[in-house]
């Protein structure tokens, strides 16, 4: 179990060092992907109230509660699965699949899912 604590400490320190650097290098991108993946797993349940509120605002109360709840469950699963994939493959920096990347980003926007496994390259090079 001590090896697990060492690995966990290394990851946490790596994320801290990577996020403290102003330049987006490999370590910062990998650390950001790991952090975003973990946050998406933990906060994926927030998709249910978010989607219920958005559906209610776009349609009516009844459909907001029923349809929004069902759509929220689907988005919860999608965000949790993409977060798990991000955590497992953090060493290959890719762009986020869910849009918006975090559930609390642009709370009024419906969650959608873009192309998967797009490498996170510098926009200057493209």
Image (spheres, grey):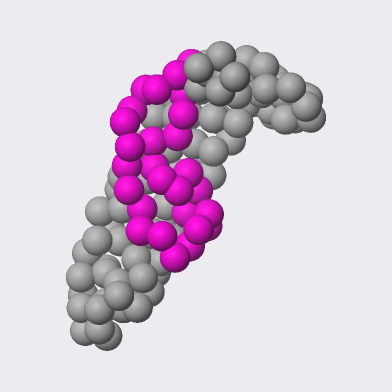
Question: Vertical placement of 42 versus 91: above or below?
Answer: below
| Nearest to the observer: residue 6 or residue 20 | 20
55 shown above or below 35: below
Query: In which image quadrant can residue 68 be found?
Result: bottom left
Left or right, 71 with respect to 103, comes to left
Residue in the image at 54% along x and 38% along y: 36
Residue 100 visible in image:
yes
Is there any visible trace of residue 30 in the rendered image?
A: no
Question: Is 72 situated left or right of 120 in this image?
Answer: left
Residue positioned 59% across, 19% down in the render: 124
Q: Is residue 1 magenta?
A: no
Q: Residue at x 32, y 48 (%)?
A: 112
Q: Which secondary structure is most common in the magenta stretch?
A: loop
Q: Nearer the viewer, residue 108 or 31?
A: 108
Q: Could you tell whether 9 is left or right of 87 in the image?
A: right
9 vs 56, left or right, is right
Say how many tags the image has. 0
The residue that appears at 35% across and 78% down in the rendered structure is 57
Can you give x and y, in whole percent of width and height, for residue 110 in the image?
35, 58
Question: Farthest residue toward the bottom?
Answer: 61
Q: Image height check: is 77 above or below 64?
A: above
Q: Position of residue 115 (x, y in %)?
A: 31, 31
Q: Position of residue 28 (x, y in %)?
A: 66, 23
Q: Which residues are magenta?
A: 92-119
Estimate the x, y position of residue 1 in percent, counting from the top left: 60, 22
């Amino acid at each position: 179990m001590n090896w697990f604590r060492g690995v966990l400490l290394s990851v946490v320190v790596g994320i801290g060092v990577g996020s403290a650097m102003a330049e987006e290098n490999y370590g910062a991108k990998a650390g950001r992907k790991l952090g975003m993946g973990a946050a998406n797993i933990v906060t994926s349940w927030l998709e249910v109230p978010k989607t219920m509120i958005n559906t209610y605002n776009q349609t009516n109360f009844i459909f907001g509660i029923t349809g929004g709840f069902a759509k929220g469950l689907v988005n919860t699963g999608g965000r949790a699965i993409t977060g798990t994939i991000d955590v497992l493959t953090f060493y290959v920096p890719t762009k986020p699949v869910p849009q918006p990347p975090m559930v609390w980003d642009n709370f009024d926007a419906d969650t959608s899912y873009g192309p998967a496994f797009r490498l996170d390259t510098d926009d200057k090079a493209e």
